[in-house]
Every structure is written in C-alpha cells, then in structure tokens.
Amino acid sequence: MYKTIEQQVRRNIAPPALRREFRQHDFENLHSFCLLIFVVSIGIWLLFDVIVSYLGQQDFTWISMAFITIMVCMTIILAFIHKAGHFDILNLAFITVITLAMRLVIEGLPVGLRPAWLVLGASTVLYSVSVLPVRRWSFFAVLVVSWINLHPFQVPGVRLFDLRGLMFLCYGVFINGLIIYTYLKMRRAKLYNFYMSKVLLDQAYIDVLTEIPNRRSFMAKAQTHLQDDDVQHRYLAMIDIDNFKKVNDRFGHDIGDVVLKRTAANIKASMTEFEYARLGGEEFVIYLWGVDQADAERRVDALCKRVREDAVEHPVTISIGLTRILHDDNLTNALVKADEALYQAKHGGKDRYVLWQPV
C-alpha cells in the first residue's frame, strides 16, 4: 500500500494550494532556525568588523553602527513575522544589507586579500540561504544581490581574463551550481515528504470507500469539541442503513458499496457544517452543536426523508438514534445512548428517528 501511495505522489504534481501550505508549514517549523541564522550572521560580521577596525588600525565608524542597527531591527521584525511570504521579502532585504556590510569590512583588508574574502563571503551567504525556507524567486534574487555586492572583480587589479580572474570565475560557477542544485533538490525532497505525509494522513482519517471521515477522525474531532465547546445544545446521531444485508445478499457487494457511497453523500450534503463519519459497515454518526432539540430533530428527520425520496436504483431507508449530550457526558456515554435510541428506531418500524429518553 505504501508503495502504491508513493507512486501516486511521484506521478502527481503537488497542487498550488498544497505548495502554499507546505511553504507556510516549512517556515513555521524553521522560524527559530531563521532567527538563529540572522543572529549568528550579525555576530560573525560584528566580530570581523571589530578585528578589521582595530587590528587594521581603522576606526569603528558610524556606518558600522548604522549597519548593526538596521540588521538588529530586521531580526526583531523576523521574531514577529508569521507568514512565509513576508519572510521572503525580509530575508532578501537582510541579505542586501549584510552583503553591503561585509563589503565594507572587506574593503578594510589589504588589497591582495580582498578578492578571496569577497568570494568566500558570497559563498557563505548563498549556502546559508539555501537551507532557509525561501521561495525560488527569493533565493535567486539573493544569488544575484550577493554576487553584485561581493564579486571579486570590483577589486583593482583583478581582471576577468587573467589567471586569478579565471580561477575566481570557475570557482564561482562551481559553487553557484552546487548550491543551486542542493537548494532545488532539498526543497523538492521536503515538498515530497510533506505531500506524502498529507496523503498518508488522509488515508488514515478518511474512509476510502465513501470519502468522508472515518471512525478515527470522528472520535478525535468529537472529543476535541466536547472538551472545548461551551455551547449548551449538543447532539449525537447514530445512523444505520435499513436492511443493508439484504441489499448485499440480493444485489451483491458492488451495489452495496454504491448504496454506502450514496448514503454518505446525502449525510455530507445535509450535515456539512457538523462533524460526521462512517463508523464502519453500514453505520454512520453525526455530531451536532449549536442547535436546540427541535432543530436537531428537524434535521435528522429531513435526512431520513432525503434518503427515502432519493430517486435512484436500489433505494434504501435509514434509521437514526438521536441523543442530547449533557455536560457530564463523555463521548462513550453519548455513543451508547445514541445506539440505544437507534435500536428502538430499528425495532419500531425503521425509516425513522428516535430521541433517547432516560428510563
């Protein structure tokens, strides 16, 4: 089964909505790491600036203070950013500022050391960005900005077609190609893993036949509602298809599957704002909230009528057990009460609902 799902994911291109969800998920997971990269980048730059300023017998100028202030402000802004799209823009602005700041420090070095440090600085920046959760346009914009600000040919005496210039060019092409390849492959692998996890979760929480939530999904969501909801009126409805075994025995399981899917579709259309699921076999369940008793009874009665009057081949009817969930009830108790009401509906003529009443 896993191999089949994997092949399906590999064949299908992730839809745009899932890609957006992935980008946001990736950014949220790496938000702290992004902050760490910003802080470490500022710290390393500050260390080199201090070294060059004092050992190189230069002053720590107001320009350095301005760069520090801007980068610290951007880091503070990052702490409050929660959208991946905003980070793409902020990261590009941060890279623009820090590469200019790196250039300022490198210009304080002896001329012979500058080209190598410019290439090293650009390579370090690009590698750091390749592991951050940025979109392609932002990554390639960073690549362009980094090499514009830190290319070695701005140093006097370094020419493209002399030996040193060609060596720098070859190294730049190699490191660019390696970083781009790594970024694209890593991003694709992360998207693939996210896509796989979504598909597997859907398989775990969606009933394959009827394509509505399954028992596991319903129990988790209903339990959360019971713990969090402050509404006074909550109801649970248990549904059973009448004479379903006879349908299977007379027409075969393929027709039985059609009946199950059609019933699920009617439940989904009638109860779309509530939690519903297929519990197993021909049993379904609905959790209703924010409705009073009259409205809950009206809704389940309308569902019975909808299934009964569905003008299709092999029509069926359903029976429903309805119970109110009291504040001291848990989900298990509510299911037991709804099942008792369903039993009464089945033995009272079927094609109806029964509201559970205490004995």
Image (spheres, rainbow, N blue to C red):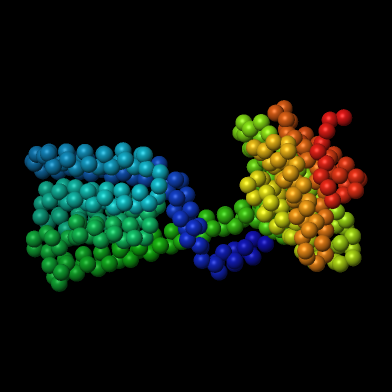
- x and y percentages locating residue 321 in the rendered image: 81, 42
Q: Residue 53 lies in what quarter of the image?
A: top left
Q: Nearer the viewer, residue 119 or 192?
A: 192
Residue at 78% x, 65% y: name it.
312
Q: Residue 260 lies in what quarter of the image?
A: bottom right
Q: Residue 235 lies in what quarter of the image?
A: top right
Residue at 48% x, 53% y: name it.
21
Along the horizontal axis of the image, is 201 left or right of 23? Answer: right
Residue at 71% x, 52% y: name it.
267
- x and y percentages locating residue 295 in the rendered image: 71, 40
Along the horizontal axis of the image, is 83 left or right of 347? Answer: left
Residue at 78% x, 51% y: name it.
304
- x and y percentages locating residue 174 in the rendered image: 30, 66
Q: Is residue 90 above or below residue 315?
A: above
Along the horizontal axis of the image, is 101 left or right of 209? Answer: left
Q: Nearer the viewer, residue 135 or 41?
A: 135
Quadrant of the image containing the C terminus: top right
Residue 60 seen in the current view:
yes
Residue 257 seen in the current view:
no
